[in-house]
Amino acid sequence: MTAAAQRTGDLRNYVLVTGAYWADTVADGAIRLLVLFYFYELGYSPLAVASLFLFYELFGIITNLVGGFAAARFGLKTTLFAGLGVQVVALLMLGLAPESLLVVPYVMASQALSGIAKDLTKMSSKSAVKLAAPAIKDRQNAVRAKIKSAAGDVTLFVHPQRAPYTHKGLATVQTKQGSTYQEAETEFQHITTAVGYMVDHDFPLGIPPSSVTQLRV
């Protein structure tokens, strides 16, 4: 597989994993909110309503303890699909259950599954994204090469009026104290990081371009 094809596959995997994580997070948060409102309207005390999520947190902690071992043994793809699958089961337990079943023990069991699903999905997604994302040094070196290459070519131009935050961010970026590559936290950090991802994806080092391509922002 060529380096370009590998990067295309990494981008596809990044989009799919990020979408799965967002979907799980939205569904998980929505169902907890609905559970809270449902039992509040039934007259349960705040303490009783809070106890509904006890197993959610407890089983989430347990999943965090064993999730890494499961991912190492079966792979991140398996644990991600397992997390999404368990979340579907937990949602169906509440969505298809008759009202007579929606009592505290039953809902706590459903929330226990949601806790397992949330942390399996989160662990798998974050680990998979780290594998697909370029290393910090690669991003920084790709940007530096566009700003000025070893041959003296300047191929990254940022308009100070049209893109003032990008211009300011690149002009003032600094590394953290004691680090040679980690950027210091500033109000422009996310902008410079985004530029790094874009440049590394479109103009990665190690893949000779057919011609010198200028990038204007």
Image: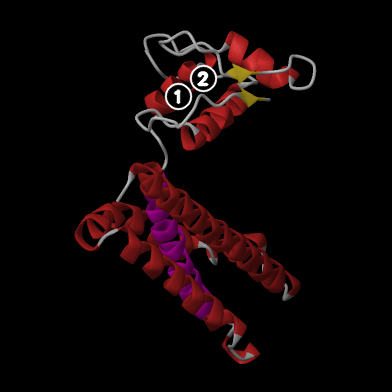
Asked if the residue at tag 1 contacts the one at tag 2, i.e. Cβ–Cβ closer than 8 Å, the answer is yes
Q: Secondary structure at mark 2?
A: helix
Q: Position of residue 200 (x, y in %)?
A: 47, 32
What is the number of the mark on residue 142?
A: 1
Main SS of the magenta segment? helix
Q: Residues within 10 Å of mark 2 (few under 14, many from 20)?
A: many
What is the number of the mark on residue 170?
A: none
Q: Is residue 78 visible?
A: yes
Q: Residues within 10 Å of mark 1 (few under 14, many from 20)?
A: many
Q: In screen coordinates, is 97 left or right of 159? A: left
Number of numbered tags placed on the structure image: 2
Q: Residue at x 51, y 11 (%)?
A: 174
Q: Residue at x 39, y 60 (%)?
A: 120
Q: Residue at x 50, y 80 (%)?
A: 106
Which of the 4 quarters of the picture holds residue 207?
top left
Q: In screen coordinates, is 31 left or right of 134? A: right
Eyeballing the image, is 107 above or below 207?
A: below
Q: Position of residue 157 (x, y in %)?
A: 64, 17
Which of the 4 quarters of the picture holds residue 40?
bottom right
The magenta stretch spans residue 115: yes
Eyeballing the image, is 4 above or below 83?
A: above
Q: Which residue is mark 2?
A: 146
Q: In screen coordinates, is 159 left or right of 32? A: right
**In the rendered view of the protein, which quadrant contains the C terminus?**
top right
Q: What segment is highlighted magenta in the picture?
A: 105-129
Q: Residue at x 50, y 12 (%)?
A: 153
Q: Position of residue 160 (x, y in %)?
A: 74, 14
The magenta stretch spans residue 64: no
Type of amino acid at the residue the image marks with label 2: Lys
Rounded to the nearest whole Å, what is the CA distance between mark 2 and mark 1?
A: 6 Å
Q: In screen coordinates, is 187 left or right of 104? A: right
